[in-house]
Image (cartoon, rainbow, N blue to C red):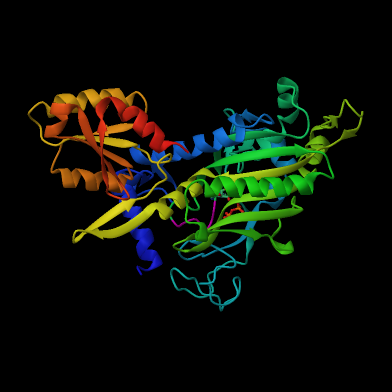
């Protein structure tokens, strides 16, 4: 068994080499825990987000979509509790200027005392006593950089949904219970970021807030827990690497009555990549208090008024992408040669099929181009006529392309092609004019 670090190293290096993920601003030495998605990565992440949107918005009558701005009124973050509560205790080293979480296991001694030793420069007595540090990124709105102009980059997308809940309700004519879904960027000035795209300072969330009548929240909580696990399983992940983790009382966020994480067994251990939270009426009540606007729901059938409870499903698009990448990575030996293959669920694969003329003569390139032009109108395909057919297959294995379409000598005679399956390596002979139907059938689900 390769060591966990080794697996992550291989994944990071494959991600760079093949254009899934690059370090941000790499030519300047990189920017800490910020990553860019390359040609394959952007397709993979987009496929995950689209699958989520389809399941959460298009396939449901009771959920509406939203795209709220990243910048919000600063009072939002007072109401949400982020200004006061979104903090980690940190210590600084006065010598080397590094900053650590106060509970960093590498620190020896008590920070603030002469015995404490900096884990980076090794100096003793240079660590400050712990201070609270807010994880929100601050910036200024308008031309003057003064306290009154401070605004924040949102640390979660959820608040954009809460402040728009009445707008969406009225515009869509939904009735409680109903939900609002959103995919968007969030920013956290994380102090111990790391593990590639697992914990980053800029990331994307896929969040859905479901508004329910108080008293029905437990039922809906169970419903969404089950739905989300089902969706995650539908990504084709190894079932034994998925589990729920219920938050213990001392783990629960200030707003939550109950919370479950969906965890994945990453090479560095079991970690959350999605959370299902019963947020009660905390958020809407707080916004009601802070804004002075009534955020009650009126049930027209019974004339009851109430502030809805909220069941939230909150997933990271980048973290889910890491789950999909880690789960797909596979090494094996084929005919005495090592093969690295990304076994993505075909629906998530960045490229669905590659078209290869066996040789660049005898009418094969012309037919291959015709097939390529035909298929690309339906799915994302890649044309490759460079190098031996074996090398071309290997390149697509690393990209996780489920099907390799080869145009050979027989193709120009009878208009059939071979379709190679990435996982079984079996080849089917398919009529060129049936290819689109064949691929559509195989890519379903
Ligand atoms: P963690 O403790 O792992 O930082 P969290 O409990 O603070 O996460 P939530 O606030 O519940 O996470 O956010 C919901 C989801 O958003 C997480 O499950 C994760 O997928 C994603 N997420 C949160 N913070 C980050 C981050 N810094 N980088 C990437 N994804 C993140």
In the image, is residue 331 part of the stretch drawn in magenta?
Answer: no
What span is colored magenta in the figure? 190-195
Q: Residue at x 53, y 72 (%)?
A: 107
User: In terms of depth relative to the viewer, which is nearer, 431 or 406?
Assistant: 431
Magenta segment, prevailing SS (helix, strand or loop): loop
Residue 64, percent from left and from top: 65, 29
Decide if residue 363 is on the left or right side of residue 347: left
Query: Quarter of the image holding residue 115?
Result: bottom right
Taking 143 as reference, is 184 above or below it?
Answer: below
User: In terms of depth relative to the viewer, which is nearer, 399 or 315?
Assistant: 399
Taking 322 as reference, is 442 above or below it?
Answer: above
Q: Give the residue at the far front of this rendering.
A: 414
Q: Give the residue at the far left of this rendering.
A: 362
Q: Residue at x 28, y 54 (%)?
A: 340
Whether residue 38 is visible to the viewer of this picture, yes or no, is: no
Decide if residue 155 is on the left or right side of residue 50: right
Quarter of the image where the N terminus is located: bottom left
Q: Residue at x 91, y 29 (%)?
A: 302
Residue 92, percent from left and from top: 54, 63
């Amino acid at each position: 068994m390769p060591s966990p670090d080794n697996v992550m190293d291989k994944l990071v290096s494959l991600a760079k080499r093949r254009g899934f993920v690059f370090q941000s601003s790499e030519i300047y030495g990189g920017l800490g825990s910020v990553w860019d998605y390359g040609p394959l990565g952007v397709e993979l992440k987009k496929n995950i987000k689209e699958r989520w949107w389809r399941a959460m918005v298009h396939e449901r009558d009771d959920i509406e979509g939203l795209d709220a701005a990243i910048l919000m009124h600063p009072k939002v973050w007072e109401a949400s509790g982020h200004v006061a509560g979104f903090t980690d205790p940190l210590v600084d080293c006065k010598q080397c200027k590094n900053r650590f979480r106060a509970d960093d296991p590498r620190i020896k001694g008590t920070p603030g005392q002469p015995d404490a030793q900096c884990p980076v420069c090794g100096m003793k007595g240079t660590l400050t006593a712990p201070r609270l540090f807010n994880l929100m990124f601050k910036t200024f709105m308008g031309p003057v950089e003064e306290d009154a102009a401070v605004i924040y980059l949102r640390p979660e997308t959820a608040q954009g949904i809460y402040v728009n809940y009445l707008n969406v309700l009225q515009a869509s004519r939904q009735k409680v219970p109903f939900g609002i879904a959103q995919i968007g960027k969030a920013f956290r000035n994380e102090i111990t970021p790391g593990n590639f795209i697992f914990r980053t300072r800029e990331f994307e969330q896929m969040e859905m807030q479901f508004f329910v009548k108080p008293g029905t929240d437990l039922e809906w909580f169970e419903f969404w827990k089950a739905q989300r696990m089902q969706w995650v399983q539908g990504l084709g992940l190894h079932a034994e690497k998925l589990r729920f983790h219920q938050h213990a009382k001392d783990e629960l966020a200030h707003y939550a009555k109950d919370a479950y994480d969906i965890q994945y067994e990453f090479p560095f251990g079991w970690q959350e990549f999605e959370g299902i939270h019963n947020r009660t009426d905390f958020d809407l009540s707080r916004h009601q208090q802070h804004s002075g606007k009534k955020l009650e729901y009126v049930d027209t059938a019974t004339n009851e008024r109430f502030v809805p409870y909220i069941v939230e499903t909150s997933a990271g698009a980048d973290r889910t992408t890491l789950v999909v990448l880690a789960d797909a990575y596979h090494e094996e030996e084929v005919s005495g040669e090592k093969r690295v293959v990304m076994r993505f669920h075909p629906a998530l694969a960045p490229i669905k099929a590659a078209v290869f003329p066996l040789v660049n003569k005898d009418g094969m390139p012309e037919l291959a181009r015709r097939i390529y032009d035909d298929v690309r109108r339906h799915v994302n395909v890649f044309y490759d006529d460079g190098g031996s057919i074996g090398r071309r297959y290997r390149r697509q294995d690393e990209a996780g392309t489920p099907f390799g379409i080869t145009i050979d000598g027989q193709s120009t005679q009878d208009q059939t092609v071979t379709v190679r399956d990435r996982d079984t390596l079996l080849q089917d002979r398919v009529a060129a004019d049936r290819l689109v139907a064949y691929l559509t059938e195989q890519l379903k689900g």
